[in-house]
Structures are given as structure tokens and as C-alpha cells.
């Protein structure tokens, strides 16, 4: 497939701090990509609702009633390619160096998991079985995408609400496979490795022990998982969910743990909704990368960042965060708002 | 001054990636600190307008008509302590280690420079002399604050517009002196140092040469400064202004360069306003830190980040940016929108 020059996505390296940035014009075509756009009510058909399957790229995976066909109603969870992909599967991933600058072709996969046929549903009112199925499908897509060895990391994240960057209201999760390890994950890996070298223990396991012990930042726990407010939370009510036993990769999750993960995620989001008035949020899976070298000292987890303050530029420009809510107070509030 | 336990700000270190976070409850008291707050029109008096000086902490510096008194009208530029400081000058900066966690007292200074008595003015309609005076006052405050050796870095930044995190509309710039070097600056310093070690040249000087040479990302230049879109721009229309000659520290700026800096900043913001419809933005000064070890290979500059997309959580969670506008296109647009 030949494309006009300039229409291919690329991934550029900042020569100063080795940060990678995807430059992808596709993404500007999304509805509501620009917050300064006229905010007229869009009464377009929702492309993610049943009956509108033709509005999306073809599905790559679904759970659907037997007897129904792909790209027709009858599904309960549906995965499609992103219509406005940040990266493309057919791009060449070679590194191009031009004087002081480096870039690589924007190779990658960008998929969307539609969580439910019900436009107005969200995780807090789905059944535990359904949420567990979402994790099962995520894992299936994960295992499939990691077969492509060009991908070094698979990002799974959910932007909930316009303020968190979502351009479609219908509940969905994004999956982006990229040919490099994102900076924050690389830094966490390095921190985990240093801690392991020094103490011969996983830093996340130590953190979980510590938080269960002092309990001031503990929000809730189930048999297999724990929800905490991290010690150095960057933003008010930043919340992490971690497996209690040591698992470096998300795909190590065992079938009987999925329902327990569904339970703690549902209850954690319920507590956030109750105490903060259903805020927009970002939910991000952090897991060990798909590289040749293994990272056994890492520990997969979910990070939830409610969007309560307007920020980005200052924090982005400095890498420095000012958080007005001590995580111990946030944990108090969330504990009080949990299901009793 | 004795405070209740817990009311002191602190700076916490993330054990995983060595990122520091200020935990400061003061900041939650600001008007409009929370984007989810009821957005009623606040018709309070503006604390930064002349006549309302009593609404603010006392001034620490001002340019004012002779014969007028501090904390009265008659000023053209006024610097005050922040009423809701993220950090406090009287806090102890000692490092506290508690098992796996580290924190230091939230010592620091937090000041506000009120740019003009005129509530509705902005940099694009100020005189060049006035803008140059703002830079002069910033430099004065900078020189004064750096005498306190507890401060390792002085952050100077402007949040313009509610979407960029500003809680007061009256034009103002913030100055925060902190007892550590922010992560992004530390990374830039490291990148600059590595480049210098390898090439014996400043990476920013090389970048400027390169950009002036190829000109596709050049927005404008004056005698002493240049405005470019950086090669790996993280967000649409991220824009940098750099001095052409090598200056590692902002305070090295020479008096005759100030008016030229005023000119390029005014014209750059004019081009941004014209082409993007007066967006909210963050403006951040990056400069060499106030530490014992010098950083001669650094090069001070301004970074402007227009707030055009809703984001934060995903980028924050991954350290990975998806930018839908190639910087070469952004430079085209801004060049076209410049004063001719």
C-alpha cells in the first residue's frame, strides 16, 4: 500500500531527553479532537452502538450470540481496529537518523474494545461476569498482538469522559501496540530493577506489604487484589489496583482471579463516583513489556487518574506535580464511599 | 511559627521512578481549583486589580509611580507572595526516610508577578517596553531568590486561561523556588551534558543552527532570538523561544536583549492567537539550576504549550505522547499568522 509522503505516522525521538512522540495526523480527524472546537451537541449515530457496526472498521474479535455474524448485532463485547489509528500495522519500523534527530516509522496496532452494547452502561453497573469477560478479551488481544515481534509494548487504557480525552461516549478501552517502551514504564522498570538488585525483592510487593501494614493509604482489598492511593500520588485521588501475589505480566492473571479483579475495579470506581461525583478519569494498565529480555522484577497494576484539576502544560513542562490532596486523606474519603 | 501536624506541605519521592511530588493542601483552597466545581460566574472583586491590593499578601517588589506607597495603586508591575502557596519558606527541608518512602519538608517560595494593572490586557497588546520590564522584574526576583541556598531550582511559568490551570483571569506569572531540580529539567540537563561530552557543543546551539538551516520548523527570528516548533513536539503547536547566542542561565540575558525577547514573545503569542483562536496556554521558562555544580552546557529557553486537546492522564501514565499535528505544519501555520 503506497501512501502520499507525509501521511504516514512517525515516532520521533526528542534528542534532549530521549522521549518518544507519535506524530500522527489521523488522530486530528476524530470527532471532538480539539477542545476549542465549537461544542455543538453531536446527534450523530453512535458508531459503537449495535446496528451501527458498519460505521466502524471490521471487528477483529467479539463475544457474540451463537448464530450471529461478525459486524452485526448480537455481540456483548466487540474489538475493532481504531478508525483514526495513531499507528499503522503496515508501516516500516526502520530507524532514520537525520543529523541530530532520530525517528522511526509509526508501526503499531491500534484497536478499540467496545465494552458493552449498552451506550449508557459503565463498569460500575455491569455484572462481575461481564467485567471479567472484558479482561479475558483484553488478554486474548494482548496474547495475539504480542506475537508480532516488532511491538515492544502494548498499552491498554481507558479514557472515560470528554475531560479525560475521550471522543466517543460509548464505553470503550483502547489497545495500542508500539515498537518501543514508553518512558514512564521504562522508568518504573528501572526503579523495580534497582530495588530488586539491592533487596532481592519486588518493589511493588514491598509496597503492598507496607500499605497493608500501615493501612492509611489502603482503600480496599479483596482476596487477590488491593486498591491503594500511592505515597507520591501526582494528582488528587490517583488510585492503583495491584495483584497481591507477584505477577510481572498482566497475562499471568489466572481465570479465578479475573472475577476478583472485576469486583475490586467495580467497587473502586463506585467509590470514586460516589465521593467525587462521577468524574472523568483515565485508567491505564502498566505491565511488563514484550521484549526479549524479561522483567521478572516488575509487577503489573492498574492506575486510575480522576480528572479533577485542569492541568497538563505545567506538569508536562517540568515533570513536577503539585497535588493538593494528601493520598492519606483521599484514601479516607474513598474508604468511606465504598460498598459496605 | 508552629503549625498543626499535617498542615505543612511536603515533597514526596516516588520510590519507583524518583519523581518528586509536592503534597500541599493550601492549593485546594484556591478559587476554581477543581474543574468539577459548579461553574458559577464569580463576580468577586479581582484581587489583582488596582485598589484591591489588600486582598493579596503584601508585595515583595513593584515598579510604581514615585510618591505612591507599597500595597496601594500606582504600580505597573507588582510581585506578591502567593496566597495559596504550594511551598512555604519557613519549613524545614530535611529528608525523612520511612522504610521505602522518602520525603522532604515542602520548603520553597511561591510568588506571583502581576503583569499589569489592566485586567483585560495580555502580552499581545502590551508595549514592548512593558514586556521587557516584566522580564527585568522576573530577573530581579530570580536573583533575589537564588540567594537562598536551600533552593535548587526556580520555576517561572504562566498559566493563561482556565483550561491551562489558571484560577485568576488577571494576567500573572508564577515563580516557585524549590529545593530540588524538576525531573524534566534534570533530563534535559543530562541530555545536554551527554551531547556536550560527545560533540563538545551545546545541543541547543546545534538545534538552533539546524532549524535555521532547514527552516521548515522555524516560526520567526529576531536579532537575538528564534521561535521554532521542536522536532518531537509533544502536543499540537508546542513552541519554543531560544536565545541565538549560548546562554545557559536566564539571568545572563543582557539589557539590550530584553526588548528583543519582548518582541519575539509578543509576535509569537500573536501568531498563536491569530491561528488558533486565542487558546489557553502554558508558558514555562527552562533555565540552568541554582546548584553548586554549574551546567554550562545548558541553554535557557521558553516553552509555550497551547492547550488544544484534553489530555493529561494517558500521557502522564505512560510518558508517551500522541501529537496529531506535525511540527512542520504547525510552523507553516504560525509563520502565515505572524505580523508581516
Image (cartoon, coloured by chain):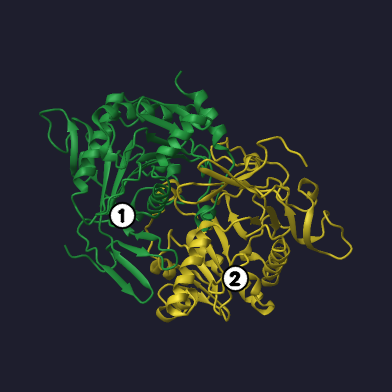
Chain colours: A yellow, B green
Which quadrant holds residue B160? top left
Find disc 1 in the rendering and name its residue.
B86
- Chain that bears disc 2: A
Residue drawn at x 15%, y 28% as measured from the top left? B65
Rendered view: B134 above or below B40: above
Q: Position of residue A282 (x, y in %)?
A: 55, 57
Q: Residue furthest right?
A: A67
Q: Position of residue B190 (x, y in %)?
A: 40, 53
> Seen in the image, is A27 located left or right of residue A268?
right
- Chain that bears disc 1: B
Residue A207 visible in this rendered orientation of the protein: no
Find disc 2 in the rendering and name its residue.
A294
Tell me whether marks 1 and 2 sit on the same chain: no
Q: Position of residue A300 (x, y in %)?
A: 57, 70
Alpha-carbon span between mark 1 and mark 2: 41 Å
**Secondary structure found at label 2:** loop
Q: Position of residue B12 (x, y in %)?
A: 35, 64
**Circle 2 Cα neighbour tier, 10 Å, few/some/many (<14 / 14–19 / ≥20):** few
> Seen in the image, is A208 located left or right of residue B11?
right
Amino acid at each position: 500500500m503506497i501512501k502520499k509522503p507525509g501521511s504516514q505516522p512517525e515516532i520521533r525521538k526528542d534528542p534532549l531527553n530521549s522521549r518518544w512522540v507519535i506524530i500522527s495526523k489521523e488522530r486530528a480527524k476524530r470527532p471532538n479532537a480539539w477542545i476549542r472546537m465549537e461544542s455543538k451537541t453531536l446527534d450523530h449515530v453512535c458508531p459503537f452502538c449495535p446496528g451501527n457496526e458498519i460505521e466502524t472498521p471490521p471487528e477483529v474479535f467479539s463475544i457474540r450470540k451463537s448464530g450471529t455474524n461478525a459486524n452485526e448485532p448480537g455481540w456483548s463485547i466487540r474489538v475493532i481496529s481504531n478508525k483514526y489509528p495513531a499507528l499503522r500495522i503496515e508501516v516500516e519500523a526502520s530507524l532514520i537518523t537525520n543529523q541530530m534527530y532520530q525517528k522511526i516509522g509509526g508501526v503499531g496496532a491500534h484497536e478499540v474494545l467496545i465494552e458493552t452494547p449498552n451506550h449508557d452502561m459503565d463498569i460500575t453497573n455491569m455484572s462481575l461476569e461481564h467485567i471479567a469477560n472484558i479482561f479475558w478479551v483484553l488478554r486474548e488481544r494482548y496474547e495475539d498482538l504480542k506475537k508480532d515481534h516488532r511491538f515492544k509494548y502494548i498499552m491498554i487504557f481507558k479514557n472515560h469522559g470528554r475531560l479525560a480525552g475521550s471522543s466517543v461516549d460509548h464505553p470503550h478501552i483502547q489497545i495500542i501496540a508500539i515498537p518501543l517502551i514508553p518512558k514512564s514504564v521504562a522508568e518504573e522498570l528501572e526503579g523495580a530493577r534497582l530495588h530488586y538488585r539491592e533487596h532481592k525483592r519486588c518493589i511493588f510487593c514491598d509496597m503492598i506489604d507496607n500499605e497493608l501494614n500501615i493501612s492509611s493509604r489502603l482503600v480496599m482489598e479483596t482476596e487477590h487484589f488491593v486498591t491503594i492511593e500511592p505515597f507520591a500520588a501526582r494528582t488528587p485521588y490517583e488510585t492503583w489496583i495491584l495483584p497481591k501475589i507477584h505477577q510481572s505480566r498482566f497475562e499471568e492473571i489466572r481465570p479465578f482471579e479475573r472475577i476478583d479483579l472485576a469486583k475490586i475495579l467495580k467497587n473502586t470506581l463506585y467509590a470514586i463516583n460516589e465521593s467525587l461525583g462521577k468524574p472523568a478519569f483515565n485508567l491505564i494498565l502498566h505491565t511488563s513489556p514484550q521484549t526479549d529480555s524479561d522483567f521478572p522484577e516488575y509487577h503489573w497494576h492498574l492506575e486510575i487518574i480522576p480528572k479533577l484539576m485542569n492541568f497538563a502544560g505545567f506538569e508536562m513542562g517540568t515533570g513536577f506535580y503539585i497535588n493538593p490532596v494528601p493520598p492519606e486523606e483521599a484514601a479516607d474519603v474513598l474508604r468511606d464511599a465504598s460498598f459496605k
